[in-house]
Image (cartoon, rainbow, N blue to C red):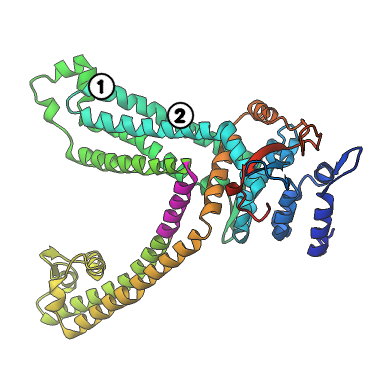
């Protein structure tokens, strides 16, 4: 009720008092378990209503000794509830646990909570228990996918049967990934693990998994792998059918069948092969998430690329307007000559560097010339009006838009650099939740029991402190958070 009435300071005082560890000669008194028993949804409540109190709340789940032992101190992390007890019904959905709530509901302004020792400890604990192994297996599958694709495309011309066998194996890997991703999406949709997007009067439910760029990339690349296999079979660039069906090969023996390929089918096959190979290699960038530093760098790159994408959209609209303006000026010049009708003036009369020009050609060449990648001699040979419009287009694009892009990218990187550690921990938390979501309840219970949260955690040797925690000896280098 204190949060509902906006009494944040009172709530802060109550949390500090409840989560304080007290003791006498008989026992220790710690209100953590009682707090969670009365308010099992407290993490979601604080995240959505009072995120400023999360630091106070999390501080109450940690105890640090005052005494040094060889430059190290004992630290007790009371994270049983923060871990997420799988035996509790509400934790059957991993997005109801602390990490799940933080990933989907924590405001960007409170991103620093990912660096809190308790949160980082839970993430690293789950990472060591099961998430690292699951992530390594998924990346091994991605590497196998790339290896199979590379080898079967390279040996296809000389060893058709080997190429077909490897392609068939890659098809199985792609089908397995598509099935696993589909199961995950169906499971999230069934349990309501997603957000609702509003498109005008329509409301669209989007599972959380669809916010993972690499998952979307993996799904699309798997679909391309299936399409590539089908096109390789139908277009037959590696003569698979002749190698596999001896009767078919003998039937066409001597008629040059092996050299007869449909040019359009081969062109389509080559394009699909190019995009498939590119996407398979790009998705391998996810392996950088294995370390926190590379994970933060990968996040920074994606943020900068999003700025570039937004700039390209603005640039396209900006330059298209100038391009069409110049295009119609040329059409008017052709009509003024008097020997061309409207159709000829709009098409055949325009030549740009020896290429027949239309509206699309103008847009392409003006964009390229604005970026300094090509030149348009026909502009310099046209009227002063055309040259004036073109000059305004180039100057506004280079001086204004490109410089604005550079400054935006620098600003984005500076902001991200201040939160690199938090972003890295958040990225690892996403991997942990993904692994935990795909685990069975039996497996989750096994890892939870391995933590032995039921054992009492001492403060000193021979002491029996409260249960529900794990003790670690932490060096001074690791105690760089204000909580300590």
Alpha carbons under labels 2 and 1: distance apart: 21 Å
Which of pointers 2 and 1 lies earlier in the amino acid sequence?
1
The answer to whether mark 2 and mark 1 are in CB contact below 8 A is no
Q: Residue furthest bottom?
A: 384
On screen, residue 231 above or below 474: above
Residue 229 visible in the current orientation: no
Helix, strand or loop for the magenta stretch, by majority: helix
User: Residue at image x 18%, y 73%?
Assistant: 342
- Image quarter of residue 92: top right
Mark 1 falls on what kind of element?
Answer: helix
On screen, residue 153 above or below 49: above
Q: Which mark is residue 381?
A: none
Bounds of the magenta span? 291-306
Image spot of residue 390 (x, y percent):
23, 78
User: Residue at image x 39%, y 66%?
Assistant: 311
Report which residue position mark 1 lands on: 162
Mark 2 falls on what kind of element?
Answer: helix
Image spot of residue 10 (x, y percent):
83, 62
Q: Residues within 10 Å of mark 1 (few under 14, many from 20)?
A: some
Report which residue position mark 2 lands on: 176
**Viewed as shown, does residue 228 lie left or right of 124?**
left
Image spot of residue 351 (x, y percent):
13, 68
User: Residue at image x 16%, y 80%?
Assistant: 333
């Amino acid at each position: 009720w204190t949060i509902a009435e906006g009494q944040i300071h009172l709530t802060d005082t109550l949390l500090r008092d409840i989560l304080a560890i007290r003791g006498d000669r008989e026992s220790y008194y710690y209100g953590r378990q009682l707090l969670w028993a009365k308010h099992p949804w407290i993490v979601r409540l604080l995240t959505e209503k009072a995120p400023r109190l999360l630091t106070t709340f999390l501080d109450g789940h940690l105890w640090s000794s005052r005494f040094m032992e060889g430059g190290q101190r004992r630290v007790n992390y009371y994270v049983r509830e923060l871990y997420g007890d799988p035996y509790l019904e509400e934790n059957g959905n991993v997005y109801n646990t602390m990490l799940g709530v933080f990933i989907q509901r924590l405001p960007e302004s409170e991103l620093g909570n990912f660096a809190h020792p308790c949160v980082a400890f839970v993430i690293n604990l789950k990472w060591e228990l099961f998430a690292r192994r699951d992530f390594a297996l998924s990346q091994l599958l991605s590497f196998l996918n790339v290896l199979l694709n590379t080898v079967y495309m390279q040996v296809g011309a000389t060893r058709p049967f080997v190429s077909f066998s490897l392609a068939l194996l890659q098809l199985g890997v792609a089908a397995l990934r598509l099935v696993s991703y589909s199961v995950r999406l169906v499971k999230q949709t069934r349990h309501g693990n997603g957000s609702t997007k509003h498109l005008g009067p329509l409301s669209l439910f989007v599972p959380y998994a669809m916010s993972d760029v690499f998952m979307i990339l993996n799904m699309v690349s798997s679909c391309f792998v299936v399409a590539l296999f089908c096109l390789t079979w139908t277009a037959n660039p590696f003569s698979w059918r002749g190698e596999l069906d001896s009767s078919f090969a003998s039937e066409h023996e001597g008629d040059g069948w092996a050299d007869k390929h449909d040019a359009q089918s081969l062109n389509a096959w080559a394009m699909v092969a190019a995009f498939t190979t590119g996407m398979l290699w790009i998705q391998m960038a996810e392996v950088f998430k294995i370390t926190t530093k590379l994970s933060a760098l990968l996040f920074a790159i994606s943020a900068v690329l999003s700025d570039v994408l937004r700039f390209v959209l603005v640039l396209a609209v900006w330059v298209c307007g100038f391009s069409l303006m110049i295009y119609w000026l040329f059409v008017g010049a052709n009509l003024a000559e008097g020997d061309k009708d409207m159709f000829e003036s709009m098409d055949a009369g325009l030549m740009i560097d020896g290429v027949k020009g239309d509206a699309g050609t103008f847009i392409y060449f003006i964009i390229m010339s604005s970026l300094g990648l090509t030149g348009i001699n026909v502009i310099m040979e046209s009227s002063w009006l055309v040259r004036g419009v073109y000059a305004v287009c180039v100057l506004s694009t280079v001086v204004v838009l490109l410089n604005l892009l550079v400054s935006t990218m620098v600003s984005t990187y500076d902001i991200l650099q201040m939160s690199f550690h938090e972003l890295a921990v958040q990225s690892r938390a996403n991997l942990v939740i993904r692994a935990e979501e795909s685990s069975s309840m039996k497996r989750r219970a096994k890892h939870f029991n391995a933590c032995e949260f039921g054992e009492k955690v001492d403060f000193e040797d021979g002491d029996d402190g409260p249960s529900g925690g794990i003790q670690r000896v932490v060096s001074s280098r690791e105690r760089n958070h204000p909580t300590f």
